[in-house]
Amino acid sequence: MAVSTTIHPLSDRGCPQPRSMKGRQPVSELDYDKLNDVQRYTQWAVFRAIPGSLDDDRTAVIEQAREFFTNLVNEGRVVIRGIYNATGLRAEADYMIWWHAEEFDELQKAFADFRRTTILGQVSEVFWIGNGIHRPSEFNKQHLPAFIMGEEPRKWMTVYPFVRSYDWYILEPAKRGRILAEHGQAAVDFADVRANTVSAFSLGDYEWMLAFEADEMHRIVDLMHKMRYTEARMHVREELPFVSGYRVEDIAELIEVLP
């Protein structure tokens, strides 16, 4: 699958990292037809570390986690978009993993192996899981997830699910298109905040998953506030939970601060 989100270990010390894309690709260089044909399942898995389960010396836990994620990357089936420190942002969450693959069973295996074979996974409880799959946008075929377009991950990320109102899907297409265009226009001053919207029907209790990425968390905060002033807000039934965190460069950064 020719999507430029291939990842590889940058060093034998850190977590596997995305290959640098030198920023966003120019729009003129993107093949939107090809990208819209890409099938990628994606998952945000959010965990709470059980307090007191880890000793003060966490060297072995760190080395084992590094080995697990490096081996996962080298197998070439699962792409790790990032591992995020969510400490202090929710009482129920300490960290989350964002990864994606061509087939969902590949994510299932990675998720199960992480929980079963690593100390970190064994001392963590699952708080929440969000699943999705890339599908072309109904009205704007150039509106693609940042991870599908091969963009670099940003430092901060917020993910949340949402469910549309009961009448949304039976509105006149022209009205839906107008509402979504207004919604998109509200974000015109936030080009630095990258969106990842994926379909979630039957992959859980939600219809859509949305993850925003930015170099600064306050940009996501301000965007989320701005988007409240649009008609699209009248067509949302559910959009919880919100989970945010910053992307760690080395899994040790995360493990060393867990309770």
Image (cartoon, rainbow, N blue to C red):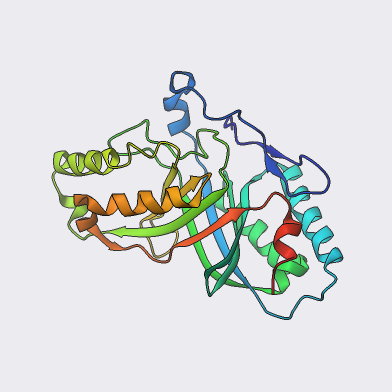
The image quarter containing residue 109 is bottom right
The residue shown at (43%, 43%) is: 195
236 on left or right of 220: left
Whether residue 176 is visible to the viewer of this picture, yes or no, is yes
Give the residue at the far top of this rendering: 28
The image quarter containing residue 18 is top right
Whether residue 202 is visible to the viewer of this picture, yes or no, is no
Q: Quadrant location of the N terminus?
A: top right
The image quarter containing residue 228 is bottom left
13 on left or right of 144: right
Report x, y in % for residue 180: 24, 42
61 on left or right of 46: right
Nearest to the observer: residue 132 or residue 258 = 258
124 on left or right of 24: right
Nearest to the observer: residue 134 or residue 238 = 238
Nearest to the observer: residue 223 or residue 201 = 223
Give the residue at the far bottom of this rendering: 52
Report x, y in % for residue 135: 41, 41
The residue shown at (73%, 67%) is: 120
The residue shown at (53%, 44%) is: 215
The residue shown at (69%, 70%) is: 258
- Compared to residue 239, the image places residue 196 above or below, namely above
Report x, y in % for residue 95: 61, 63
Q: How many marks?
A: 0
Q: Quadrant location of the C terminus?
A: bottom right
- Compared to residue 187, the image places residue 25 above or below, namely above
Report x, y in % for residue 42: 53, 50
